[in-house]
Image (cartoon, helix red, strand yellow):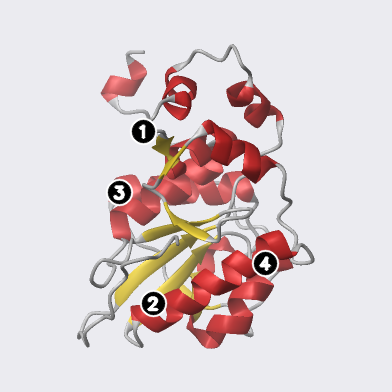
Amino acid sequence: DATRGLLLAYPSAVPNRIFLLSPASCSGRRAGLILRERASFDLARRLRGEEGAPLGDVFAFLSGLYFRGKLAYARRFAQPPGEIPGALVITPNAGLRPAEAPVRLSDLRRFARVAIDVADSRYRRPLARDVRLLAKRAGPNSEIVLLGSIATGKYVDVLLEILGPRLLFPGEFVGRGDMSRGGLLLRCAREGRELSYRSVQGAVRHGPRPPKLPPIPRRPAEASH
């Protein structure tokens, strides 16, 4: 169970905050690279080891900038109650899993066999189960923020059905594509600047494209490589 051991939140003047990260494709070109039998780069080796590799790191490899931004932002700003993980990742067939949860090659292969499609019970049922558990264990003082597109029903429909107005998202996401959202989140994580959140329920899901973000300045250590 992805959220086993979660504790009820105690009332707090400052709301607790949990992030739900939309999934990465497990059947695309980059998935093919890491699933190759001869893959020898570090993450591929870890994925094949007994301890596995963190789910968030694997999905960041599969998705690139977009998931890297979501992961960095969630790690920076999560304020989970009790023992609930602050960053939970939507998976194709295992519901919600902590971003730090280890996954192995066999897990990734199982992910690749299931599409992110609400019509597929292998995807929908585990997700609905874990979201209900999260809603119960997180308590009424916790904000649950989706880091993902609200323009798709692939996961929004399931989340809204259970969470209703409790499901929030960064308002600055409206009108942005995946790469723009990823860049925005990565920049905010580095600057320590949190975005503003609004309820997904009743929100405008499509809007005019905002101005293009300037390039993220490289840090000295990054520029030297």
Residue 118, how many percent across, how many down? 74, 66
Q: Is residue 214 visible?
A: no
Mark 3 or mark 4: name the one nearer the start of the chain: 4
User: Element under label 2?
Assistant: strand
Element on which disc 1 rests? loop
Q: Residue at x 59, y 65 (%)?
A: 126
1 or 2: mark nearer the eye: 1
> Which quadrant of the view contains residue 149?
bottom right
Q: Nearer the viewer, mark 1 or mark 3?
A: 1
Q: Which residue is mark 2?
A: 143
Give yes or no for contact between labels 4 and 2 (Cβ–Cβ under 8 Å).
no
User: Label 2 is placed on what type of residue?
Assistant: Glu
Q: Earlier in the sequence, mark 2 or mark 3?
A: 2
**Quarter of the image with the C terminus in it:** top left
Q: Which residue is mark 4?
A: 124
Residue that mark 3 sits on: 191
CA gap, disc 1 to disc 3? 33 Å
Mark 1 burial class by Cα count in 10 Å: few <14, some 14-19, many 20+: few
Query: Callout 4: helix, strand or loop?
Result: helix
Residue on which the image places disc 1: 51
Q: Which class describes the residues within 10 Å of circle 4: few (<14), some (14-19), or many (20+)?
A: many
| Lower sequence index among marks 4 and 1 | 1
- Give amino acid for label 4: Arg
Image x and y of residue 130, in percent: 50, 70
Residue for point 67% across, 66% down: 124
